[in-house]
């Protein structure tokens, strides 16, 4: 009896071994074949780079091996894993990490790209009913709040069931450094340059005045409008700028106006990237005073009007008092003259002993900073 059961079990095992390979891959999930791009049926306008002209796919167990080729023959190879494990690979300084999952018969691929540029590529692969068309919906996302674009790539299988003969089955794939894997966005320039002469609007965070500010005091500001280069925000609104009061002059007692000299020293983005420079003041909306662009100097209002009012007021008061005193003595006219002279002298003395109005720049005052040199960033340094 036991030998018979053993033979029966052996037969069942043999049958399972024969059946498993055939059932290992669901036909609706088998992307194997050589696929050619149908540009007329595809929607490629939003793609940052040309779509692969040919895509060769072979599947083995939980691995999907891919080779893409462009029209001039350049190719790249890589492997996706369908068992929830992460596929990691590197092209130059760019690192890719892909996670996959099945959504029915659709194959979803989420690839995080880090390096000189950071972005996420999401693919959705789906076969047609006759297995002769492979449709890939591809989305690009740059940063949490960056723009999202979508493209549709339609591939036709000229020879269903054909597999990539260039790569032995079961051999691990390694990306071709000469060409990034499918879904990779085009390489950005090595540097993004904000050129000298760029005007950056700023808002003052801490107030300044000629009465309380002195040489060496720090000035804190924020950018009030984003600066873009080639359609990309390089310096976002709200970036921090620090500056220095290089000189603060209080107004004189006889003449002169209050003056503040400013210099801008550094710019810090929201992610902490900082650039040091020495930039000048290009303008201000301060209601009072005058602005000297060449020296980066803001000059306060003078006191001529208030000085004249002071002298006039004291002169009039002196004349009134003199007239009253003169009338008592029977010399009203003379008393008025003497009183006016005395009042004028008192007013002039008051003017001589008092300063003009201090220059005050309150929080929220707008300035314009002009870069005196190029400010350079690598793409990975930007938010």
Image (spheres, rainbow, N blue to C red):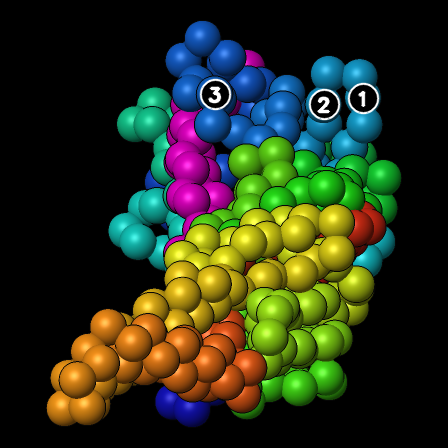
The residue wearing badge 2 is 70
Above or below 357: residue 132? above
Judge from the rendering whether residue 247 lies leftward or rightward of residue 356; answer left or right: right
SS of the residue at dot 1? loop
Q: Nearer the viewer, mark 3 or mark 1?
A: 3
Which residue is pictured at 60% across the width and 61% down the height? 298
Residue at 24% from the left image edge and 72% from the top image edge: 333
- For mark 2, give the secondary structure: loop
Q: Is residue 176 magenta?
A: no
Q: Counting other residues with Cα less than 10 Å from the Cα at mark 2, is it few (<14), some (14-19), or many (20 or more)? A: some
Q: Where is the N terminus found, in terms of image quarters?
A: bottom left
What distance separates the C-alpha of mark 1 from that of mark 2? Answer: 5 Å
Residue denoted by label 3: 45
Residue at 47% x, 67% y is 303
Ranked by sequence position, the earlier of labels 2 and 3 is 3
Q: CA distance from mark 2 to mark 3?
A: 17 Å
Viewer-closest of 58 and 279: 279
Residue at 55% from the left image edge and 36% from the top image edge: 231
23 and 330: which is toward the camera: 330
């Amino acid at each position: 009896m036991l030998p018979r059961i053993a033979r029966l079990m052996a037969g069942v095992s043999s049958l399972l071994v024969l059946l498993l390979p055939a059932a290992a891959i669901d036909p609706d999930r088998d992307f194997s074949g050589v696929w050619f791009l149908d540009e007329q049926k595809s929607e490629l306008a939003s793609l940052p780079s040309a779509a692969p002209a040919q895509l060769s796919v072979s599947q083995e167990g939980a691995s999907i091996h891919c080779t893409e080729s462009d029209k001039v023959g350049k190719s790249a190879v890589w492997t996706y894993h369908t068992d929830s494990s992460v596929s990691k690979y590197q092209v130059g300084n760019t690192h890719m990490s892909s996670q996959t999952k099945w959504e029915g018969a659709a194959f979803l691929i989420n690839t995080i790209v880090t390096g000189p540029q950071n972005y996420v590529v999401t693919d959705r692969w789906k076969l047609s009913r006759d297995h002769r068309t492979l449709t890939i919906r591809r989305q690009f996302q740059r940063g949490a709040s960056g723009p999202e674009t979508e493209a549709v790539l339609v591939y036709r299988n000229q020879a269903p069931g054909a597999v990539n003969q260039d790569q032995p089955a079961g051999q691990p794939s390694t990306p071709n450094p000469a060409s990034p894997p499918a879904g990779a966005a085009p390489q950005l320039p090595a540097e993004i340059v904000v050129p000298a002469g760029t005007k950056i609007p700023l808002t003052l965070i801490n107030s300044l005045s000629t009465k309380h500010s002195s040489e060496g005091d720090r000035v804190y500001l924020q950018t009030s409008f984003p600066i873009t280069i080639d359609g990309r925000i390089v310096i976002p609104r709200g970036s921090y700028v620090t500056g220095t009061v290089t000189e603060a002059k209080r107004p004189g007692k006889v003449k002169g106006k209050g003056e503040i000299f400013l210099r801008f020293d550094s710019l810090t983005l929201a992610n902490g990237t900082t650039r040091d420079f020495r930039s000048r003041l290009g303008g201000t909306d301060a209601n009072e005073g005058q602005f000297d662009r060449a020296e980066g100097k803001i000059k306060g209002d003078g006191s001529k009007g208030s000085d004249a009012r002071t002298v006039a007021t004291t002169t009039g008061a002196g004349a009134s008092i003199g007239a009253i005193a003169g009338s008592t003595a029977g010399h009203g006219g003379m008393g008025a003259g003497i009183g006016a002279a005395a009042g004028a002298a008192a007013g002039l003395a008051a003017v001589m002993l008092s300063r003009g109005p201090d220059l005050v720049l309150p929080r929220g005052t707008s300035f314009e900073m002009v870069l005196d040199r190029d400010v350079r960033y690598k793409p990975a340094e930007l938010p």
